[in-house]
């Protein structure tokens, strides 16, 4: 415990949300205290799995196909990602060797809570769809497919969303 506290006191003044490699002109604007908000992801509608994934899973009962979402934060001005990447739990699409449909609707029902000091409109959220092919017997991921992404203007919403960080002033 004491070692962890020493590390935190050492690292805290040196951590700048992943912008420490940027010149001061490119560092995004930040508030003094955190603001909180949430991102609700209900479902993906009209998603088309990659053809390679569709063709490779036909009549193979040892393959499980699932899809998940990754959310990363991106600074447009410096062309760099920052912070941590959040990943949803995988949603199984098939695990019985049946052919996937050419077009799918995938229900996620995810709610992601974020706390950040960043308030720069040039910072966005990037939501990426990732399909995975896994061997059921071994649990080994055989392939992952990046299947598209969307930008979410988290720090430039009009009107601004209510701050949900009440009680987290010291985070």
Image (cartoon, rainbow, N blue to C red):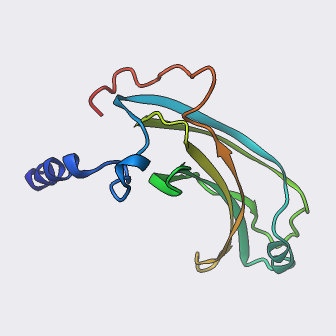
- Hey, which residue is sitting farthest front in the picture? 25
Residue 82, horizontal then vertical, whole percent? 45, 53
> Is residue 24 positioned above or below 153 on the image?
below
- Hey, which residue is sitting farthest right in the picture? 102
Residue 61, horizontal then vertical, whole percent? 78, 77
37 or 118: nearer the viewer: 118
- Name the residue located 57 percent from the left edge and 22 percent from the top edge: 160
Q: Quadrant of the C terminus?
A: top left
- Name the residue located 85 percent from the left edge and 60 percent from the top edge: 48
Q: How many marks?
A: 0
> Is residue 168 positioned above or below 128 on the image?
above
Residue 23, horizontal then vertical, whole percent? 36, 54
Left-right relation of 155 to 41: left
Left-right relation of 46 to 36: right
Q: Quadrant of residue 87?
A: bottom right
107 or 35: nearer the viewer: 35
Q: Quadrant of residue 148?
A: bottom right
> Is residue 159 positioned above or below 60 on the image?
above
- Name the residue located 20 percent from the left edge and 52 percent from the top edge: 11
- Name the residue located 50 percent from the left edge and 57 percent from the top edge: 80
């Amino acid at each position: 415990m004491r070692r962890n506290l020493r590390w935190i006191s050492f690292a805290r003044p040196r951590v700048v949300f992943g912008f420490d490699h940027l010149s001061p002109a490119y560092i995004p604007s930040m508030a003094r205290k955190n603001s909180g908000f949430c991102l609700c992801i209900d479902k993906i509608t009209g998603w088309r799995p990659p053809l390679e994934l569709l063709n490779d899973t036909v009549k193979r009962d040892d393959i499980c196909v699932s899809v998940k979402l990754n959310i990363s934060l991106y600074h447009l001005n410096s062309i760099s990602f920052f912070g941590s990447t959040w990943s949803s739990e995988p949603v199984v699409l098939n695990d019985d060797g049946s052919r996937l449909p050419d077009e799918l609707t995938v229900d996620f029902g995810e709610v992601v809570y974020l706390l950040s000091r960043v308030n720069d409109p040039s910072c966005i959220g990037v939501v990426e769809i990732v399909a995975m092919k896994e061997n059921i017997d071994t649990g080994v991921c055989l392939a992952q497919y990046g299947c598209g992404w969307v930008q979410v203007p988290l720090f430039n919403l009009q009107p601004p969303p209510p701050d949900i960080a009440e009680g987290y002033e010291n985070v």
